Structure formats: C-alpha cells, structure tokens
Image: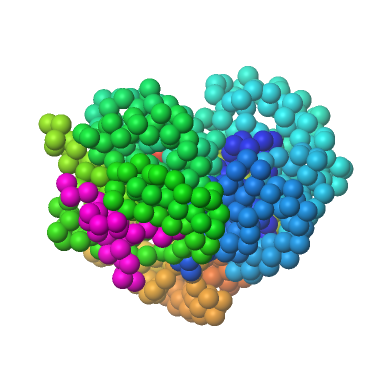
Amino acid sequence: MAKAIMVQGTMSNSGKSFVTAGLCRVFRQDGYRVAPFKSQNMALNSYITREGLEIGRAQAMQAEAAMVEPTHWMNPILLKPTSSMGSQVIVNGEVYDNLSAQEYYKMKDSLAPAVMEAFNHLAAENDIVVIEGAGSPAEINLAENDIVNMGMAKMADAPVILVADIDRGGVFASAYGTIKLLPQEDQDRFCGIVINKFRGDVEILKPGLKMLEDLTDKPVLGVLPMEKIDVDDEDSLSDRLNRKTRQEGIDIAVIRLPHISNFTDFSVFELIKGVSLRYVTDKRELEDPDLIILPGTKNTMADMEWLIESGLESAIKRCARNTRVIGICGGFQLMGKELHDPDGVEHGGDMRGLGLLDISTIFKGDKTRTRIHGTIEEEHNIYHLDKRVVEGYEIHMGVTENLGTALPMILLEDGRTDAYMTPDGRIWGSYLHGIFDNEELAFGLVHQIMEEKGIDPEEDELSIAEYKEIQYDKLADLVRNNMDMDRIYRILFGDSAEASSAEETGGNEEDEEDENRIGCGGIKDDTSGIGLVHLYCGDGKGKTSCTMGLTVRACGSGKKVLLYQFLKDNKSSERKIIDKLQGIRVIPTLPMKKWTFSMTPEELEELHRQNDAMLDQLIALAPDYDMLVMDESLYAIDRGLLSEEKVIDFLEHKPVSLEVVMSGRNPSQRLIDHADYVSEICKRKHPFDRGISARKGIEK
C-alpha cells in the first residue's frame, strides 16, 4: 500500500491545490508512482476522464503534474453548486442527486465507504498518494462526520501539512488558530507548516517562523515565494477571473457568468503573443472587443436572467453585429433563440436566449458526459485548418437542435452534430470543453483576427503541452528549492529514508571544473597505484556530465576505461564521441521498452535480474581496465533494480588499482562509507526555470 501525505489549508485558496500538484511532480521526478486524491471537491471546473466520468479539474491538473492518467478514483465526490443553497452531487464520476447543503450534510457520512474504496484503489497502485483537503480543517461546525479534512486524514492515517497564505495577511494567527482550534488528536496529525505566497526577504520572516514553531510545536517545512507559475486554478477564487484591463493587440472578453464553469477552456489564449484575455461582469466593461466568449455555466437559464438584468444581453447583441462571438457548452446554449426546461432540471419553464444562433435547447434529466473526437466540416472550415479533427469533452444537461438556418460545424464520431455557426462563421458555439486545446484551431482563430486588424502574427508559439510541462517543472523546482523535502521524505518513510530519483535521462548541466567546490572533483595523479571510489550524487543536474568528463580525462591520460550506463537508452549526445574513443569500451545498455514507473512488478523483477547479470559481467571484465564507470548505478540501487549487497561486495574485493566511478541520487550510508570521493551536485540556477528547454549538445 502507498504512503499517504495530506495537504490542508488555513482557508480556501491558500494554495492547497498548488502545493499538492508541486509535491506530485517532485515525487514523480524522484521516481515514485504517485497519484493525487481529494475525497470531496466543490467546484464548477470539472473534467471528464477517459472512461466518461466527471471529476474536479484540479485533480485532473494534479494528475498531469504526476504524469498519470486522471481517473474518477482521484475525486470520488464532486459538488457542483447550482444555487447558493444547493449542489449537484457527483459520486464516483456519476450524478447522484441534486441536494441542498443541509440534505447533503445529513447524508455525507454514508459516502465514507465510497471515499475509502477510491483511496484504497489508488493506494494499491501507487507508492505515494498526495491527499488534498478542502477549505479549512478548523471549520469546527462541520467537524462531525468530516470526510475531507481531518476525517480523511484519520481514514488514510496520513500526516498533514498545513498551508497558510501570507499574501492575505494574518498568516501567523491563521496558522496558529487553525491548529489550536482542533482537538489534540487532530493537532498531532500536523507534521509541519508551509508559508505560501511570500514576497520579500525571508530573513526578516525567520524570527516569526521560530515563534510560530515554538507556539504550535510544529516545524515550518518551507516558505514558498510568490512566483508566476501558470497551472489551472480550481475555482472562481482564481486571480485570473479578476483580469479586467484591456491591453494592446487582440482583445478577448470572456463574460464572467455567475455560475461560470470550466473557465480554464480559455487559458490557451493567454499563451499566444499579442493576445489579452479579460473577464467582464458589467456592460460598461464590455466595450468593443475583437472576440466575445460565452463560457460554460452550471445554470444556463439563471445566467440568462442575469444577462438580461445586467444589461449585458443587449450589449453583447450590439457587439455581435461586428464582433465575433463564440459560446462553449452553457454559453453555446445561451446563444440560441429558445431555452426550455419542462421538467425543472435546472430552472424550470421557458425563456428566450440571446438569439445569435438559430438553435433551441431542451433540458432533460440525462447528463451527457463523454470524451470525444469530431471533425470540422470541410465546407465550414472557416480558419482553413490543415487538421480538421478536434478533441474535447462534453459535460452538459440538455439537447440542442437546429431551428433551420444554423450551419452544422462539427460532426462527432458518434454521428451527432456538435457545433453550429452563422453563414459567415463569425458566430458559433460548441459543447466541447477543451476545444481550444486543439492548438491549430486556437491559433487559426487568433491569426484570422490579427490579419483583419493588420497585425502580423508572431511565429513559433509554444505548444500547450510543452508550456504545461514547463510550468509543472517550475512548480516542482519551487517546491524542491523552498521546502524541506528531506524531512518530508522522512515523514513518509521514516527517519532512515532518503529521497530517490528516477534520473533515467541522466545528468545534464555542464559544470566548471573546480576541485574546491561541491559537485566536481576528478582523478588525481595516482603515483601509489591505488584505485579509489567516486560517488557523484545530489538533486542537481550534472552528475552524468561530471562522470563523462572524468571518463574522458582518464582516457586522455592513457587509462583504459570500461563504461556502462544503467537504465539509459544509448542515445545521449556524449555517447556519440565516447563510443569512438579507443581507450574507452562502452557496453551497450540493455533495451528498455518503457519507463520503470510503468512496469509491472514482474517486469521490475526481470529488470533487476538483468542488471545484476550485467554487474556480474562488468565485475568479470574489470580486472583488465584501469577504471570502471557505472553511470546511474546509485539510482538503480536506490530503486531496488540493482543489488546493493553485490555492489558492496565488489567494492570490498575489487582490484587494488581499479578506479570505480558511480553516479545517481541517494547513495546509502554504506555506499558512502565505501567511497573515497563523494561529490554532491545541487542546482542554484537553471535556464529551464525561464522556460528554456533542454538544448542538444548542452543539456542532452
């Protein structure tokens, strides 16, 4: 079963989702199978899994950070507010019922078995489960039958990290009060405090941190600086919804509906150069944008009433004479002429829509919930796309029909028509959430607007997938560099545990040779004929670079070198030259068809057997060489894929003149004791933090 650790907050939007995602990526980088989990989430931003089940968008984001497929096990209960007093309750990805807050509170303890079934499923498949709480654990009026904060921590037997937001002020009071309001058994579950969103000099903060530790008897595990890292936000507290300023270039105005959902559909536009995205709640703010977007909503008819009452209905219709308008899901329904709810599914009754599309929507009890592909009709390929296939997911109540003059735009793979447009293509709507994640469509739309305005589109836009990976890695670096990860690993695995790392891609950074600082070193002239043992370790990039540099130096001095790289693919740039050096014999790496984290126990056992057999071969060959280099052997040992006992026995009985070089993360104390050089590499700064990807010949 997996080890569990929980992240709770002093308040909503303190950074729980952010820290959870960061820990997921750090653990994944360190070679662990990790999954996020939130027993109960209240949010209108949701996601449809590959199985067609609905979960909170935050857990899908955290799964991306963990580099795993999102599943309904990660969020067994999702509450989607339909009014100020009630929510649609989704259990294990499917609609359970629409309940008032009081009705749900009375029955939620009956959902504990479903919560534990989901948690146990993840725990059986992973090494670590990172659990996110909700709101604050100090909501003492809700403590009875709690299944999302301390109640969940008890069920999972998880230590708890408390995240406090210093940017809002009162951080010491909120952290102290949260802990001290709880009964002692709950206080004992806190393993530490993380201060989030800090601006300024941390040295000034340290006296306060010491007092907080003394008052709470809990260590401060880290102070996370305020840094712009763009990952999907969980709910309407998102700062991005407060963006109202119009900037130069293309102006996109998203109508911030009272029940707005899945606003992350439009994040892609923030990545395109020359585009500004803002959210509008008032008709005076709308002005004359280049594009109006009507987003998803959990209550289409209630939000239509709001559009009418706020005056935005007439403002949008005025702009639509010259401005493009696009609606997604509930926004698509709003664009029609008619809205009908005969069974009271959402609101009840009949209502007019904006009348921008000649369509009508009837709300029915069944909820459409699926991931699906579609094809843009050739004759309606308004952005002249080379790739007309689009992908997205549907989450909606209701069926939309063409009243006669709307043109079908997208044909879904199951035969349904998804999107409709006006004849000129300037106004259209679709049910597909995530439709703008189809990059060619998003860029085609923006470039068409730019061309009409006489703006030259900038080239080389960063792909959405690349951008997300950069952001997740930046988040991991923020967590790794500002939180005590060694202590967190000890909390998870005990005092003797150390963090491990799947450095299957090898070290990268070029390091300046300087024998007086950590991370370098080299072979000194060996006049005694005694071979020594080197370990290159640490969490920074550059271990393999140092190892390869040492290999070349030894070869250049006339030494014969035997080299083997564990868990690598024979494709790194340094191999192209090292393979050609006559003084170095490189044993080709065993073929690996998949990453170790995706291997079955049987496959891992076989890989362990193969690595041990390779070690036996290296030991047999070693007496004929001056140096044996075993790149990433420390990682292989740490992950149980190479026998430490066999390695130590070799070091104790190796030929006296043989120099042995090993690299990787987390050497055990026994290995350190058998080494003569232990060089630890730590990262101070890396261009990847600024979004610069690995460059061939430099980092790869």
**Residue 203 picture location, percent across and down:** 61, 22
Q: Residue furthest top?
A: 204
What colour scheme was applied to this rendering of the protein? rainbow
Residue 88 placement, left or right of 555 = right
Q: Main secondary structure of the magenta part?
A: strand
**Region in magenta:** 395-424
Image check: 331 left or right of 417? right
- Residue 599, visible in the rendered structure: yes
Q: Vertical placement of 6 versus 387: above or below?
A: above
Q: Going 60% across and 54% down the picture, which residue do you hit? A: 88
> With respect to residue 23, does 636 lie above or below?
below
Kindly identify the residue that appears in the image at 43 percent across and 57 percent down. 362
Q: Is residue 405 magenta?
A: yes
260 or 121: nearer the eye? 260
In this orientation, which residue lies closer to the viewer: 486 or 631? 486
Q: Quadrant of the N terminus?
A: bottom right
> Which quadrant of the view contains residue 579?
bottom left
Residue at 14%, 59% (x, y): give it: 379
Image quadrant of residue 353? top left
Counting from the top left corner in percent of width and height, residue 221 is at 66, 38
Residue at point 48%, 69% (across, down): 51
Q: Of 654 and 304, which appears nearest the observer?
A: 304
